[in-house]
Amino acid sequence: MTTTTREIHLASRPQGWPTPENFRTVTTELPDPGPGEVLVRNTVLSVDPYMRGRMNDTKSYVPPFALDAPLEGGAVGEVVASGDDSLSPGDTVLHQAGWREHALLPAAQVRKVDAGQVPASAYLGVLGMPGLTAYVGLTRIAPVQEGDTVFVSGAAGAVGSIVGQVARELGASTVIGSAGSAEKVRWLTEDLGFDAAFDYHDGPVARQLADRLDGRGVDVYFDNVGGDHLEAAIGRMADFGRIALCGAIASYNDEQPAPGPRNLMLLVSRRVTMRGFIVTDHGDAAREFYERAGAWVAEGRVRYRETFTEGLDSTVAAFLGLHRGDNIGKMLVRL
């Protein structure tokens, strides 16, 4: 037998901001799984900022998406047929064959997860790649020390919202975040326990950050945005501060390179360490993260929020909305 299903292909490479015309929904047939394979019905798909870079035909840390082929991304789903003894129909699994309704995969490429304690979608967010990214950045790249002041940009997103909370668990005394709306600022300060937050639309980032630091320096800056946020953070770094460069969403859709920070000499005079990282280089941190974060989530010490769109046909809109800041917390597509 075969399964009729749909998947989203990259039809053309975007120039600047992607448009719906860059994508195509295709109906296809999948055979029953052979030995060592599983057929998964996806239930939740993830859209993430890094996917924009993979739409360009440029050399990077991960190969670009192929044209006229399904896009890829994190997903959770239910096993509907299995040719492998390690997995049974009804199991919930995590994998990287998103942007489609069904996926036929080698069993070695999926990971069974426990959806009894937390929703399956949590493994795409707080207990998945975004959560691990936050943890790696704060423990391996720009380690938080007791009493530190931590600033995170994009603080209401999937990674940033976890960064602020994990920083507190690791001993930070002050956590400050930037976000893109008054609602997001309220969520950070009233629900997640940030000491201060600001809407970057309300004025120059450098001024707003300085106002909330009240004379202190930033010991750790976790950068998801780049641009004026990075320049502002460099301007307020404490001596021997640490910067973790995770992303630069402010420039992902630029057609021309944006000017870099104008104050890089401060990295020298203040002896600041600035380091970029990719979470997939740090698989050795995963077990430690799952143990610690699982307990934090179970005890309500780390909270999370999800923004859902409905149905495969909403996936492109969800991806575009992510870049406009439509989400609070993790942006997901529910099938």
Image (cartoon, rainbow, N blue to C red):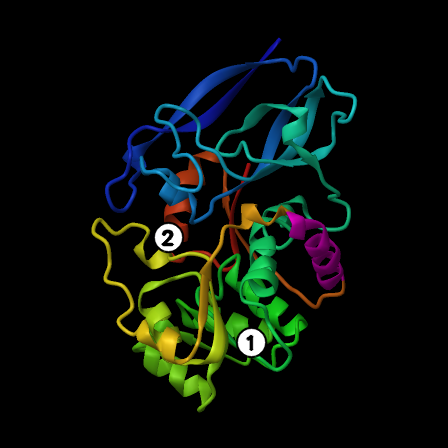
Residue at position x 36%, y 72% in the image: 200
Decide if residue 182 is on the left or right side of residue 175.
left
- Say whether disc 2 or disc 1 marks the residue closer to the N-terminus: 1
Considering only vertical position in the picture, is 81 above or below 180?
Answer: above
Q: Position of residue 306 (x, y in %)?
A: 56, 54
Question: Which span is picked out in magenta?
Answer: 284-298
Q: Position of residue 192 (x, y in %)?
A: 59, 71
Residue that numbered label 1 is attached to: 194
Q: Position of residue 39 (x, y in %)?
A: 64, 22
Considering only vertical position in the picture, is 162 above or below 59?
Answer: below
Residue that numbered label 2 is attached to: 323
Q: Quadrant of the C terminus?
A: top right
Q: Residues within 10 Å of mark 2 (few under 14, many from 20)?
A: some
Q: Position of residue 293 (x, y in %)?
A: 70, 59
Question: Looking at the image, do the residues carrying marks 2 and 1 touch, with CB atoms under 8 Å apart?
Answer: no
- In front: 218, or 298? 218
Decide if residue 254 is on the left or right side of residue 67.
left
Looking at the rendered structure, the secondary structure element under dot 2 is helix
